[in-house]
Amino acid sequence: MSNIVRLIIACVVMGAGVTLCAFGFWGWGILVFILGGITLLTFFFNENMLLAQYYLRKENSDKAEAVLVKITDYEKQLYKGQHGYYNLLVGLIESRKAPLKSEKYFKKALQLGMGMSHNTALAKLSLAGISMAKRNKREAEMYLKDAAKDDKNKLLADQIKMMKGQMAQMDKQQVVRGGFRQKF
């Protein structure tokens, strides 16, 4: 359902609630007004996005992907502030199947912007992992440094520390043409 339609329905239902209160039907008026408020909340927080986040937390990416597929045109169906989060969720699901293909979603999420800094840090941390897989150390270091800056609540501190350790090991090992590893 389009966001404009949700907004119109919410306004009509809330108006009906106020009207019922004005005519003395307080119980029904308050109930209808609350239902209108819930409909208004779906304008800002899409139910498909909330379900996808729930399934990702439960590590059920198949159900999360099935819920996100229901969003056919995210630019029309989602509030503008959720566009970055949509791309982040799609990138997280895609990274479980094909990590290198998820890079475009994380970059798009950063480009569109996200309100919470730890989500920005998560996108940059994922991009750092993709850069490490591509053996692009400079870009990986840049993303890791930015992720550490954005992780103000230290929610991703362990992952950042682990990835820095992996990067240090990447420095110690260098693959030579013959496939032999040489330690320095």
Image: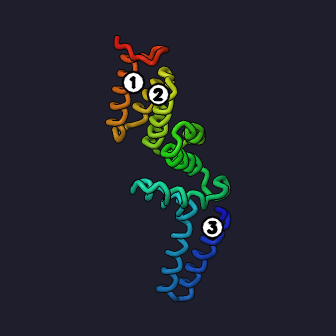
Label 1 element class = helix
Q: Mark 2 — residue?
A: 132
Label 2 element class = helix
Name the front one of labels 3 and 1.
1
The residue at 39%/24% (across/down) is 167
The residue at 34%/11% (across/down) is 184
Using the numbered discs, state the Cα–Cα distance from disc 3 to disc 1 in whole angstroms: 48 Å
User: Above or below — where is 14 with respect to 86?
Assistant: below
User: Above or below — where is 31 with respect to 134?
Assistant: below
Type of residue at label 2?
Met
Name the colour scheme.
rainbow
Q: Residue 20, image x and y in percent?
A: 56, 84
Mark 3 vs 2: CB contact within 8 A: no
Type of residue at label 3?
Arg
Name the front one of labels 3 and 2.
2
Could you classify mark 3 by the number of other residues whose Cα lies within 10 Å: few (under 14), some (14-19), or many (20 or more)?
A: some
Mark sitting earlier along the chain (3/1): 3
Residue 6, label in figure? 3
Mark 2 vs 1: CB contact within 8 A: yes
Using the numbered discs, state the Cα–Cα distance from disc 3 to disc 2 in whole angstroms: 43 Å
Using the numbered discs, state the Cα–Cα distance from disc 2 to disc 1 in whole angstroms: 8 Å
Which is nearer the eye, 51 or 132? Answer: 132
Q: Mark 1 — residue?
A: 167
User: Above or below — where is 162 with respect to 1?
Assistant: above
Could you classify mark 2 by the number of other residues whose Cα lies within 10 Å: few (under 14), some (14-19), or many (20 or more)?
A: some
Count of numbered tags: 3
Q: Is residue 21 visible?
A: yes
Residue 151, label in figure? none
The residue at 43%/33% (across/down) is 147
Mark sitting earlier along the chain (2/1): 2
